[in-house]
Amino acid sequence: MGNDMVKRLAWSGLLAGIGALTTIVANKLATAIWVRIFDEDPPE
């Protein structure tokens, strides 16, 4: 039972970490595209 719980927690942590990393990368990419197209910072 404990082993299954550890696996579930590890899976949740992995998903959260990848989700956060994906969000950061997507934000940086969108900002770079916006600056290249409009030559200004994106709206806040």
Image (spheres, rainbow, N blue to C red):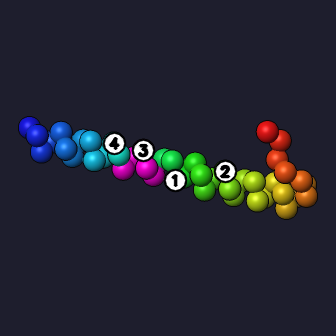
Question: Which residues fall within the magenta stretch?
Answer: 14-18
Measured in 3D between alpha carbons, the distance from the residue under mark 2 to the one under mark 1, in whole angstroms, is 10 Å
Q: Give the mark, 2 or 4, whose residue is nearer the N terminus.
A: 4
Residue count near mark 1 (Cα–Cα under 10 Å), binned few <14, some 14–19, many ≥20: few
**Picture quarter containing residue 33?**
bottom right
Q: Quadrant of residue 28?
A: bottom right
Report if the CB atoms under discs 2 and 4 are less than 8 Å apart: no
The residue to which callout 4 is attached is: 12
Which residue matches tag 2?
27
Secondary structure beneath label 2: helix
- Evaluate if marks 3 and 2 touch, with contact meaning CB atoms under 8 Å apart: no
Q: Quadrant of the N terminus?
A: top left
Determine if the magenta segment contains residue 20: no
**Label number found at residue 42:** none
Q: Badges 4 and 1: C-beta atoms under 8 Å apart?
A: no
Residue beneath disc 1: 21
Give the secondary structure at mark 4: helix
Amino acid type, residue under disc 3 in the picture: Ala
Disc 2 to disc 4, how far (Cα)?
22 Å
First in sequence, mark 2 or 1: give its number. 1
| Type of the residue with mark 4 | Ser
- Residue type at mark 1? Leu
Cβ atoms at labels 3 and 4 below 8 Å apart = yes
Whole-Å distance between the Cαs marked 1 and 3? 9 Å
**Residue, x 15% and y 42% (percent of image)?**
4
